Amino acid sequence: MRDQIDRRTFIGGATGATLAGLTGCLGGGGGSEAPAHVGMVYSLGGLGDEAFNDMTHAGIQRAEEELGIAYDNTEPEGQSEFSTFQQQFASSTDPDYDLVTCIGFSQLSALQENASEYPEQDFMLIDSELDADNVASYRFREHEGSFQVGHLAGLLSTREFSHEGSYSGTEKTFSTDPEAKTVGFVGGKENPLIKKFEAGFIAGVHHADSEIEVRSAYAGSWNDPGRGQEIASSMYDAGADIVYHAAGATGSGVFSAAGERGRLAIGVDSDQSLSSDASHTIVASMVKHADTAVFNATKDVVNDEFQGGSTVMLGLEDGGVEAVIGTDYEGEIPQDVLDALESSREEIQNGEIDVPTEPEN
């Protein structure tokens, strides 16, 4: 996916009135003729993660195509660059950015200062919230979608299930072992947000069967596939048939481990079965529609309806998160499993199931 993105190298040191050499694309109507200009400050890990950042990029691409806006991308390589890139977009006059999109909770601290310093600049913040008139915040009920894929993992782990596919050019069988009753969770960096993914997943697994063991571990990085593969391999070797990751680009290592061992994995943020070379390992993904949040916020700016000072919360009920069956597994999941997932989704939506945001002790 990364090679398909039109990218230019960011030239450091640009300050004041203009931004130089932003990575990405200036499109949609071109220059001053566009109805709005948007500056994208991505989360750590950058574009090509086939997950959170790429999902938000899809949202701004949709806005370019449907609304005719123009946008530029920046890909911070460290925490300290968040503030710099936010400021460069906010202080630019050629172009004058109508919206600066700040992707990820890690940008909150920098934005708290910059939103105050640039009160006339509209900002969007994803995965956290800031009470400021010039900031529109978007958060998600990741625990609800994670409950759904956890429920799926639990239901499949307790029965004999197999899928014929391939990995690295070799035909393989990807299967579960109902005798093991073990699944796994791999997080990126350990923080309250990713704990919501873990908490929902564990609750969903135990909704299927309270005796299933859930092994959890954190890689400490969003961009270390080798570490993700090492952790997942140890989980599979300990009996896990399915491992769910919420680890950004680190998660590609989980898919590699599943491919090598003929086990199953669950992706995150986007339908990762559509972009991964290890698609036959991905039985499902917990899709988090950050693309919709980016598109809607941009549309609000174009329509002069910017939702500054508000927080939009997106969950199962409004399509903000969902469990999506992997493209290679469509038609293979037993109907009683699909029916059970539909039932738990309805129970979450009507309040019969209260999904935790912190993992069970």
Image (cartoon, rainbow, N blue to C red):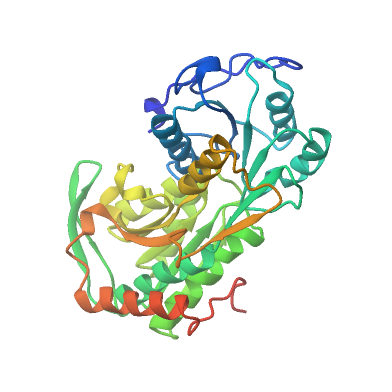
Q: Quadrant of residue 148?
A: bottom left
Drawn side of residue 280 relative to residue 289, left or right: left
How many labels, in total?
0
Q: Quadrant of residue 4?
A: top left
The answer to whether residue 226 of the structure is visible from this angle is no
Query: Which is nearer the eye, 231 or 356?
Result: 356
- As drawn, the residue found furthest toward the front would be 304
**Residue beneath the point at 45% across and 68% down:** 317
Drawn side of residue 331 relative to residue 220, left or right: left
Quadrant location of the C terminus? bottom right
What percent of the width, then of the height, locates residue 261? 31, 57
The answer to whether residue 30 of the structure is visible from this angle is yes
Query: Which is nearer the eye, 52 or 174?
Result: 52
What percent of the width, then of the height, locates residue 348? 46, 77
Compared to residue 289, the image places residue 155 above or below, namely below
Compared to residue 356, the image places residue 268 above or below, namely above
What percent of the width, then of the height, locates residue 135? 70, 45
Query: Which is nearer the eye, 35 or 30?
Result: 35
Drawn side of residue 95 relative to residue 263, left or right: right
**Residue beneath the point at 40% across and 84% down:** 209
What percent of the width, then of the height, locates residue 127? 61, 52
Compared to residue 165, the image places residue 241 above or below, namely below
**Residue beneath the point at 30% across and 45% down:** 274
Compared to residue 317, the image places residue 304 above or below, namely above
Q: Quadrant of residue 330?
A: bottom left
Query: Which is nearer the eye, 8 or 217?
Result: 8
Quadrant location of the N terminus? top left
**Residue beneath the point at 44% across and 57% down:** 232
